[in-house]
Amino acid sequence: MRKIFFLTVFLVVIASCKPEKKEVIPDVKPALTEQQIKAQALFGVLPEMAENPNNPITAEKVALGKALYFDPILSKNKTQSCNTCHNLKTYGVDNNQFSPGDGKGTLGGRNSPTTLNAALHVAQFWDGRAPDVEAQAGGPVLNPVEMGLSSEKEAIDRLTAEPKYKEMFTKAFPDSKEPITWDNLTKAIAAFERKLITPSKFDDYLAGDDKALNEQQKRGLQLFMDKGCIACHSGIALGGSTFQKFGIYGDYWKETKSAKIDEGKSAVTKNPSDKSFFKVPSLRNITKTYPYFHDGSVSDLKEATRIMGKIQLNKELTASEIEDIIQFFESLTGNVPVEYLK
């Protein structure tokens, strides 16, 4: 009887020592607002990098691409690098209307677009003559007005003479018998550019953080959607996915006081119906990438926004509407990762 008593007491003590079960509170994310749901559907999720299955991104390839991006060795007089016109410290542009070339007194014929997020676009250059950043990377090197090398061979000969590039190309392309080739050069620069993605407060907002945008920015976003800007500036880059006629409801060169009429895409396709068609630029980092349009004819973003409303949408935007939209544009400003700066 005594044994039974002590056994009972022992079991009671053991039972009382068991840890209490804590109530598991599920991780419930706050419900998205109607605006967030609509914006998610229109703009999507920004990836960490713009991948290309035909050019797998590796650390070695990116390191090589970065070195080439900043090296003036690929210009005739060794005065220009990719970064000269597409300065990553100033959001992938040089903020000039037209960029000076390697040759004395030379100027490009169109405004230099940003390289940030460019790999997300459907094509490259204002007229879309390159299908991707791999095809684009070699264009400026051989352009007589830009970097001015005479041939692909000249570029390869210069790089082959540099011991550091022999080592870097071998590491980046270990399966190549001859690592230093034109194709590998363009792939390396492209791999680096495919990492130049700049998430912003707007992406936090799309991901569910309702406080990422202030009330004025939300009003600007709503106007941006309601006024019809999304007809061209949608998708993850807020542009870059289509070609559109510049000046649907008026002549752009009159409204912007442009110095000349640019044939646009028709200069490449030779199709008259493509006249004045240009690739729609991305609006990411737009407050930093002035001047605007293919000819850099407008430096003020408020004026550029007014013009776009008038000749693209046939709408006269009010001063307060423009101000709200500009504040929304501010939320699209991201940061270039420090490791990709020189």
Image (tube, rainbow, N blue to C red):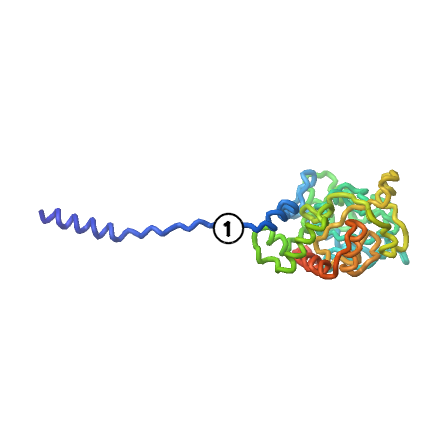
- Residue placed most toward the observer, 205 or 320: 320
Residue 134 location, quadrant: top right
Q: Is residue 330 above or below residue 138?
A: below
Residue that carries the numbered disc 1 in the rendered image: 29
Is residue 328 found left or right of 82 in the rendered image? left
Q: Residue furthest left?
A: 1
Percent coordinates x, y for residue 187 in the rendering = 73, 43
Q: Nearer the viewer, residue 342 or 91?
A: 91
Crowd tier of the residue under label 1, counting other residues whose Cα lies within 10 Å: few below 14, some 14–19, many 20 or above: few
| Residue ID at (67%, 45%) | 50
Task: Tell me the element at label 1.
Answer: loop
From where the camera sits, is residue 64 visible? no
Along the horizontal axis of the image, is 191 left or right of 142?
left
Q: Residue at x 23, y 51 (%)?
A: 14
Would residue 261 be seen by someone viewing this image from the given angle? yes
User: What percent of the width, then of the height, locates residue 179?
Assistant: 73, 42
The C terminus appears in which quarter of the rendering?
bottom right
Q: Amino acid at mark 1?
A: Lys
Tell me: residue 286, above or below residue 186. below
Estimate the x, y position of residue 317 in percent, counting from the top left: 75, 56
Residue 242 x/y as whole percent: 75, 43
Is 50 situated left or right of 274 in this image?
left
